[in-house]
Image: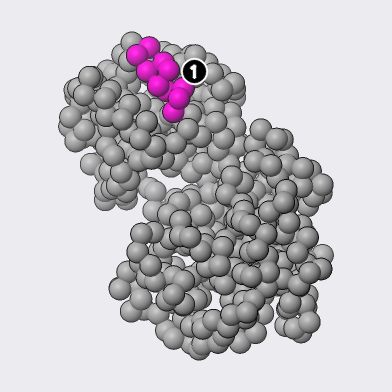
């Protein structure tokens, strides 16, 4: 089986969020399961010179996009045993200030989607599956069905579309359908939804299979609370939706070999986790108190992450005798809150603004509890990383959090959960966690059990392969 995995970002080349982790890990896992999987992404100007020096120029071609004919250079690179195609157009992709958020993102990623299909007409790779991700590649199934089904090489290729976060849909004015995408009149309804162009809607309608990044999220998005307006369309297409829980790179996230943490450890040398806690407390200016549970959050500071719940009961949380560490950046209201709490509760609360990967790893290794009270969480990777380092998650039962964390009160429990989006339900889960922390033998057993949890990509890859085979039948 040949798979072309299309994504707007992928490690090690470009990253802004969880999609890059998936695109940088899943293809290798699929290859181990017997597939020939290659990845295609834009050649951004921000890609390091070291990585660019390893790229090989292949060819160039022009991409028809409405009234435009745009240059596209094709480069190849290899990383982790996977071949990557990088599509070059400096006007669209050589920009400072990040990957997304430009005034012409609709045009940039319509170009990328069309260029993927044009590329397939000139390379010696004929995929059975085009696996597309989020709105930035949502036009691939649309363009394929409208413009490229007559190409013999692409006549029988199947398309899979994965929704990583339904909140971001690629919604634009109706002029984008013709002036940017160049769709003929009969195809405009494919991308029309609620009076606007909606690229994700186009993929949902035109692809052969829709996947989400967790089984629970696959059902949640059929509800108006989670569907961000697309729930009506998704209910119509529910027959072709499935959810597969993401994995993590267990080779990278490994406390036994991680050089970024203070002391390497594993389930047999779990005392090393205590040294990481002490090191984290020193780094963050907290009191070195091994008897106090240390709660951590590594997150985007936005409302969807449940931070209003944290604000509401923060004083009560501190009354439990806990320390609190936060790493992240986002909305000013939350940044300001945690900065204020760190000033008022020096030695107990620490806040670092920004995202520093080396500090994040020290937090995963040094914290006792990892808090994720999300309003919505399509998959979530942080809770899996936390478990990998023996840090016990406290989560709300939504999306991938529900699929990966079992409450300690149940058989096989690996964390503490609460159901309703309620601050005091969250506080109750933290109280239960604090009570277990007092039971040193019980806590040690919980940490060892956490270290044994398997969230490797191999598990997920088997499910993806079964889904791809189903699509091809």
Quadrant position of the N terminus in the picture: bottom right
Looking at the image, can residue 82 be seen?
no
Q: Is residue 87 left or right of residue 291?
A: right
Residue in the picture at 60% in, 63% down? 137
Q: Residues within 10 Å of mark 1 (few under 14, many from 20)?
A: some
Quadrant position of the C terminus in the picture: bottom right
Q: Label 1: which residue?
A: 423
Q: Give the color scheme: rainbow, by chain, secondary structure or one colour.
A: one colour
From the viewer's side, name the closer residue of 233 and 32: 233
Residue in the picture at 47% in, 32% down? 303
Q: Position of residue 109 (x, y in %)?
A: 55, 66
Q: Quadrant of residue 206?
A: bottom right
Q: Quadrant of residue 375?
A: top right
Predominant SS of the magenta segment? helix
Q: Position of residue 51 (x, y in %)?
A: 35, 72
From the viewer's side, name the closer residue of 384 and 168: 168
313 part of magenta stretch: yes
Seen in the picture, residue 281 relative to 214 is either above or below; the reply is above
Looking at the image, can residue 15 be seen?
yes
Q: Quadrant of residue 389?
A: top left
273 part of magenta stretch: no
Seen in the picture, residue 25 relative to 305 is either above or below; the reply is below
Start and end of the magenta stretch? Answer: 307-316
Seen in the picture, residue 88 relative to 7 is either above or below; the reply is below
Element under disc 1: helix
Number of callouts in the render?
A: 1
């Amino acid at each position: 089986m040949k798979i072309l995995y299309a994504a707007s970002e992928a490690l090690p080349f470009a990253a802004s969020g969880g999609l890059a982790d998936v695109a940088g890990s899943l293809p290798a896992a699929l290859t181990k399961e017997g597939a020939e999987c290659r990845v295609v992404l834009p050649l951004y100007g921000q890609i390091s010179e070291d990585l660019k020096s390893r790229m090989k120029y292949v060819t160039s071609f022009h991409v028809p996009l409405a009234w435009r004919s745009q240059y596209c250079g094709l480069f190849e690179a290899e990383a982790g045993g996977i071949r990557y195609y990088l599509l070059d157009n400096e006007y669209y992709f050589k920009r400072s200030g990040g990957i997304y958020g430009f005034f012409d993102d609709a045009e940039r990623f319509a170009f990328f989607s069309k260029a993927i299909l044009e590329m397939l007409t000139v390379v010696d790779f004929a995929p059975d599956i085009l696996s597309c991700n989020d709105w930035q590649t949502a036009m691939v199934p649309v363009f394929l069905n409208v413009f490229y089904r007559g190409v013999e090489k692409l006549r029988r290729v199947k398309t899979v579309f994965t929704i990583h976060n339904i909140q971001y849909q690629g919604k634009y004015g109706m002029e984008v359908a013709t002036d940017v995408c160049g769709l003929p009149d009969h195809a405009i309804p494919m991308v029309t939804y609620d009076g606007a162009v909606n690229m994700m809607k186009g993929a949902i309608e035109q692809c052969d299979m829709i996947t989400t990044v967790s089984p629970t999220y696959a059902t949640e998005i059929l509800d108006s609370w989670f569907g961000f307006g697309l729930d009506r369309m998704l209910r119509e297409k529910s027959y072709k939706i499935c959810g597969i829980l993401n994995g993590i790179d267990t080779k990278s996230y490994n406390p036994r070999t991680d050089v970024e943490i203070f002391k390497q450890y594993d389930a047999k040398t779990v005392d090393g986790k205590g040294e990481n806690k002490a090191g984290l407390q020193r780094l963050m200016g907290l009191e070195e108190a091994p008897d106090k549970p240390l709660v951590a959050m590594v997150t985007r500071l936005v409302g969807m992450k449940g931070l209003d719940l944290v604000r509401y009961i923060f004083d009560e949380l501190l009354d439990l005798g806990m320390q609190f560490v936060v790493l992240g950046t986002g909305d000013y209201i939350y940044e300001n809150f945690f900065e204020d709490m760190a000033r008022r509760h020096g030695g107990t609360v620490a806040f670092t603004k920004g995202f520093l990967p080396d500090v994040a790893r020290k937090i995963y290794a040094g914290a006792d509890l990892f808090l994720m009270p999300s309003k919505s969480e399509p998959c979530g990777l942080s809770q899996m990383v936390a478990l990998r380092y023996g840090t016990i998650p406290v989560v709300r039962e939504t999306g991938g959090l529900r699929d990966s964390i079992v409450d300690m009160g149940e058989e096989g429990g690996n964390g503490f959960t609460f159901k309703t989006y309620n601050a005091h339900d969250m506080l109750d889960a933290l109280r239960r966690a604090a009570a277990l922390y007092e039971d040193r033998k019980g806590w040690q057993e919980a940490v060892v059990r956490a270290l044994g949890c398997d969230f490797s990509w191999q598990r997920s890859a088997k499910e993806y392969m079964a889904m791809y085979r189903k699509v091809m039948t």
